[in-house]
Each structure stands twice: as structure tokens, then as C-alpha cells.
Amino acid sequence: MRTLVNWYEALFVHRARLALLCAAVVIAFFAVFAPRFHLDASGDSLLLENDQDLRYYRSIRARYGSDDYLVVTFSPNGDLFSAQTLKQVEALRDELSMLDGLASITTILDVPLISSPPVALEDLQIEVPTLLSERTDVELARRELTSSSLYRQLLTSIDGTTTALLATFRRDPAYVQLLTERDALREKQLTTDLTTADKRRIAELSPAISDFRARLTWRQQKDIASVREILDRYRVYGDIQLGGIPMIVTDMLDFIRRDIVVFGAGILVFLIALLAVIFMRPRWVVLSIVCCLASVVIMTGLLGLTDFPVTVVSANFVALLLIFSLSITVHLIVRYRELHEQNPDAEQAWLVSTTLRDKFLPCLFTALTTMVAFASLLVSGIRPVMDFGWMMVTGMVVVMVMAFTIFPAGLMLLKAGSPQHRRSMTAAFTAMLAGWIDRRQKTVAAAFLLVAAVSVYGLSLLTVENRFIDNFKDTTEIYRGLVKIDQELGGTTPLDIIIDADPAHFQAADIADEPTEDEFAEELDDEFADEFDEFAESVDDGDLGSTSYWYNTFQLRTIGQVHDYLDSLPETGKVLSIATTIDTLRTLNDNKEVDTFWLSILYKKLPQSVKQALFDPYLAVDGNQVRLSVRVFESDKNLRRGELLDRIRTHLTGEMGLAPERVHLTGMLVLYNNVLQSLYESQIMTLGFVFGVILLMFLVMYRSLAVAIIALVPNILAAGAVLGLMGLLGIPLDIMTITIAAIVIGIGVDDTIHYLHRFRIEVVIDHDYHSAAQRSHGSIGRAMYYTSIIIAVGFSILVLSNFLPTIYFGILTGFAMLFAMVANLTILPLLLIWFRPFGTLPVVSEPAEAP
């Protein structure tokens, strides 16, 4: 270690210009790759790693179509079904159809109408009537579109004042194929070891998928920007809102970009002002800011070089790097000024060298504990949280290297000058806390016991249920669009119920005697003889009515029961299924009950365009699987996703008797719920990991179990206080707030290590624990005060975000930092005084006398 320190001083203290040149070369190298830095706000970036439901969700989307569509709601100033308004809708549809990125636009003008006026099945084979057809009665169309179980709350509101235009994006088959292949390999990896070829293929797929996603996201952003330009021209005709998952992704990307710029610039300006006020010399401002900016440039370039995306969870990484970098440099500045005040005639080289020797180990340990805190996020299983952990672990290495490179080398280029006298306000605050632990020990202990009790109660109130809509301010288009669709168009969050055929049915069919065509024909009325001839011929062609499990009157009644149950739930809005299709088409049978024969004839004679619209989204091609599409009210304050899914699953498998392996719940509601339900476990795992590793680090550092346990106490209290406060305020855990406790511990432990390091030095001078606490408060207590204030106020900049979890993250982390500072300056020294754990430790000498 001594050899390493001597080599370090020779390079960074005695050859400062060379050290700065090397640092400049490294910074310039990474700056070249900074433009490659990119963002990711796709749905995949907010989901669980290796979630089996995600793979099933993708397969269902491939079979029945994607739910990733734009929703344009239009509430015209006049009557929706007036000729003028219909022309406006038509013009809007035509303009949107001109965009290359949109595959289709579905409006009230395009869907088949079979009751406006009523049409026969034979008529549909000639022409499929729509709202723009010459023979369509507009008033009858109004009634059909607002009352039909198929179109009501899908394309029109119940009161007929709002309509929706549904726009789907073109899918890239190559991208879908890459995702399918990668997911298959990941699923294989869960059960067996991958071959060398498989590992190589995964390594090839990841960058290819990332490149595809970046291109598709960029293209989609351009398309949505074009959509907004078109919509702006039509806002004079009524109220227009834009919604849908693609729009949410695009806006969240804009939020991330804005947050990175605002957080970075805001905190930078704030830090410059705060440093100037605290230290009153330009050198401290310049050196600190250069260290901060160097860390940000290198980390941004590294992310671009490694093609590592930034998500909404990690959007505050710039702010965190600035804060952590400044925290280290402030400790260096405070120690340098303290040495300079004690040794006003000392040479600059001695002051810099002694500062580095005094602070290197505590800063190293604080960086390591912070890295451990972020590394604990890797066990969460949530992809964006894990990526954030990796990013900040690497970032702490960069921060540490830059601080101990640029700060000493830059300081060596300057003269020591006259020492600065420390400010009295900080001394008064730390002296007040020192007085508390001297004269009010029982009061301090009782106060923290009360805090612990309240925190435990708050923890019991902590939940993971939160509405996606609550993540955004009510002034954002995302919020307004979600509310509009929720209230007038039957809900926003998609949930699919997939029911497979009963395998026993096919086994029985293989051994059963099939009736002959003649026996079947005898059961039919004479009036259907001609139709039966055609039907009998279709059987040989694999007619759906004769070969499928679900497409018959008996099984459709089961689907109707499931449909009605889902529709009766207070949390659900629009429900669509094959039962909706049959109910809509019943008018072709004079509104009479239908039988299997009629269903077979119907499917055979329907035009392909009608099948694509009314059958393909809800019935598999072979008729052996059905899909019920449900939209859930995201704005429902009583929504409990986990309870809703359990209730649906229990009803279908219990009361209706469907085998559990036949029933599958999928969709964004399920995937989002999986993330939420994993948060409790993830929080416990991350906290357990970080506390366990930090306890081991304390044991290694101090070789004392008593010291290690005492050192954990203020950090456990800080983490408990912030989580308890969340419970008391009703703030749920989410993918942002789950990181708070680990970060609080990582940063709070920094203060603990610095204080213990200084206390250990002070206590061996006279073995008086009370005096050691007083002296420690007067020295390292100042640095702890400065860094805690800087961190707390720095995190408060996050309130400028449009993403509410980020705002909570900033406020709660700032609160926790101030709490941790107070705990480390009160309960920590109090426990040291009571238990005297340093009694047998070796003496740590003071720095050598200044030359």
C-alpha cells in the first residue's frame, strides 16, 4: 500500500501537468462516443427480466394482433353524425392514412354496419355497407354505433358525442423474429445450460435487437410528431386527445430527455452557487465542477460506446453522478482547509499529499458501500432497475477515479495562499448536535425509538398498488388522454383472457363414431336442404363449424357466460369476444337464436374483410382457442390489479369448472401487475443484500462486530424512516421508489464511515469518548453537513420532472439524506459513547507535522 501511495503521489502530486494531460486524453476519448448515447422508454424496458408471461403475451399478439395502437378521440363542436362532421372525420382519416408508418386507420366510417338498415347474409357477399354507403341510414347508423355491443365504447361513446380513430403501426417482421428467437433462448436458459452456439447467438441478437428498436423508436417518434401536426389542424372542429401505448412511449422519451437536461443543468447551476456560498473561493468551485463534468462526460461516452440505453428509471443518472462526485470533492476540500488552517505555512505539496492520505481510505470505503447499495438493485429482477444498478456501480468507479485525479493535480497548479477561517453557522449547528449527545442522551435515544416505532407502523401501510395514470401530472397529454379514453371509451389498460380447447374433447373425437351426412341431414328442416348440400361439401374442406372446439352453439354459450361475467365487474370497461361478434351478426338471422349449422353457413359466406374485423381478433384460425379482450378502468381509484386477476382466475377455474391449464390471463395489465407484485420481494432482497454486504465490509474495516452493528443503526433508521413515511403518506412502491432505500443506505453509510474514521483518530488521543465526539463534530461534522445539504437540495431539483415517481424519488431521498446526517451526528456517537467499542483498537496516529 505504501508503494502504491508513493507511486500515486509521484504521478498526481509531483507531475500534475502530466496527470491532467492523461485525464484530458481519457475524457476526449469517451466524449467521441457521447453522441451515441440513447434512450429507451419501450414497454419492454419497464418489465420483469425473464418474465414467462411476457413471452406468452408476445405470442398472443402475433396471433391476434397488437394492442399497440394510437387512439385519437374526437369530440366535435356539432353533431357527430352531421354531414359536416363526418366529412371532417373522413378528411382526418385520409390525412393520417398518408403517413407511411401507419398500417391502418379504423373509424366509424369504415366498420361494417348490418342494421342501418338491416341486410341479409347474401347482401354482405355483394357489398359490406359502411357509414359512407349510399343506402346507409345515418340515424340507424347512429343507433347501431352507439348501442351495438361491438362498437359502443370502442369507436363511439355511449352518448354519441365522442368518436375514436384507431391507428395501428406497421410491424417489422424481422424485428418480431429476432425477439421471438431471443426469448426462446432465454426460456431455454432457465431450464438447461446453453450451448456455445446458443450463447454466441444471444450475443449476436442483443445488439441487433437494440439497433432495430432504436430505428423503430426513432421512426415511431417521427410518425407521432406528424400525427400531432395533423391533429393540430383539426382542433378548431372540436376537442381532440391522443392516447395509446406508442404515444405514451414517445412522451416518456421526451420526459427522459427533458429530465436529463433539466436535472443536469439545474443541479450544475445550483452546485456552483452553493459551492461559491460555502467555500467563498473560485478554485473550489472550478475544481469541483471540473471533476463532476469529467465524470458525466466519461460515463455518457461509456454508455454510448457499450450501447447501454437510459430508461425513465435511470434518467437521473447525470444528477446522481454530479451529486456523488461533489460529495467526495467536498470532503477533500474540507480536510484540505482544516489542515491549512492548522498549518498556515505548510507547502502546497504537503497539504495536498496529507489530504489525500487522510481521505483516500474513507472515500474508497464510501464509494464501495455506495457501489454495494446500487449493486443490490441487480437482485430486483426488474430490467430497468437492474440496468440502473449496473450504470451507477460503473459511475461510482468513474467518480472516484476522476476526483482523486483532477482534484489533487489541479490543486498542485495553484498556490496554497492564505488559510480560510471556517464559517460559524455550520459550527453552531454541529455544536448544537454535539451538545444534545452530551446533555440529552435519554431524550435523543427516546426520540429515535419513537421514530423507529412510527416507521414500523408506516411500513405496515406500505403498498405496491398504484395507478399508471398517477405517474403523470394532470397537465400532460398522457394524463388527459388516459382520462378521456377511460371515461368515454371503455377503459385503457388491456387485459386478454385466452381459453384453450379441452384436450379431452379431441381424444374422445378420435374414438367416437361420427354421424353420416344423411343422418345429420334428416334432422334439418326441408327449407335448409339446399344450404345443407353446400355445408356438406364444406365439411370436406375443413369447415370451422364441424372441426373446431369453440365455434358451435354449445361452447359459444360458455364464452357468453365468461363474457357476461367480465362485463359485470366494476373494474372493467369494454369487453369484446366472439360472443360479441355472434350477437352483432344475429340480425342476419332475424334476431333468432342461432344453431351450429347456421354458424357454419355464416362463416362460410361472410366476406374476408368482415372475418378479419369480427372473427380473427377473437377466434384462432382453427377455432380451438378464443380470446376475450377486456379494457380496465385505469382511473379507478379502487383498482387492485392482483385481486382482480385472482378473482377472474378463480371464477373461471372454480365456479365455471374450466381446467386451470386451459385459462391464460395476459396483456399489459398482467405484465404491469407482475412488476408491482415483485416489488415487495425485490425491496426485501435489495435491503437484505445491501445490509448483509455492508455489515461484512464493516467487519473487515474495523474487525469489531460491535462497531459494525453500531454503524448499521443510523442507516437502518434512515431507510426505515423513508419507507415508513411513504406508508404514512400513502405513496406506493414503484420502479422508482424501490431504489430509494438502497440509495439512502449507500449514501448514508458514507457519513457513517467518515465519522467513524475521524472518531477513531480522535478517541485515541485521550481515550475520552465525549471529547472525541466534540472534536469529531467540529471537524468531519462540517463536511457531513455540507455534503448532506448539497445532496438533499440537489435531489430537490427532481421536482421539476413531469414523471411523478421521479418527483417522489427526489423529495424522499432528500429527506432521507438529512435524516441520515442527523442520525450519524446524534445516535451514532451516542452509541459509541455508551458501548465504547474502540477501547482495544490500535492507536491511529495524527498526520506528520507539516514541513
Image (cartoon, helix red, strand yellow):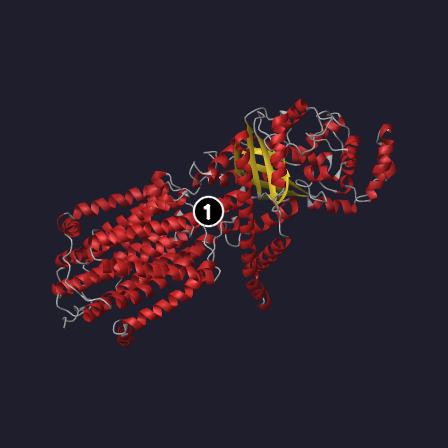
Quadrant including the N terminus: bottom left
Figure check: 698 above or below 646:
below
- Asked whether residue 49 is in view, the answer is yes
Residue 272 shown left or right of residue 142 in the figure: left
Residue type of the residue flagged with mark 1: Asp
Residue annotated with mark 1: 254
Expressed as whole percent of the image width and height from the top left, the position of residue 690 reads 36, 57
Q: Residues within 10 Å of mark 1 (few under 14, many from 20)?
A: some
Expressed as whole percent of the image width and height from the top left, the position of residue 422 reads 15, 56
Expressed as whole percent of the image width and height from the top left, the position of residue 55 reads 58, 51
The picture quadrant where one finds residue 514 is top right
Decide which of 727, 370 is in the foreground and name it. Answer: 370
Expressed as whole percent of the image width and height from the top left, the position of residue 761 reads 18, 64
List the single residue furthest toward the top: 139
Decide which of 564, 845 is in the foreground and name it. Answer: 845
Q: At x 53% / y 40%, what residue is drawn?
A: 228
Decide which of 240, 793 is in the foreground and name it. Answer: 240
- Asked whether residue 816 is in view, the answer is no
The picture quadrant where one finds residue 291 is bottom left
Figure check: 835 above or below 67:
below
Total numbered circles: 1
Element under label 1?
helix
Figure check: 556 above or below 68:
above
List the single residue furthest toward the bottom: 3
Quadrant including the C terminus: bottom left
Decide which of 565, 751 is in the foreground and name it. Answer: 751
Residue 505 shown left or right of residue 755 in the figure: right
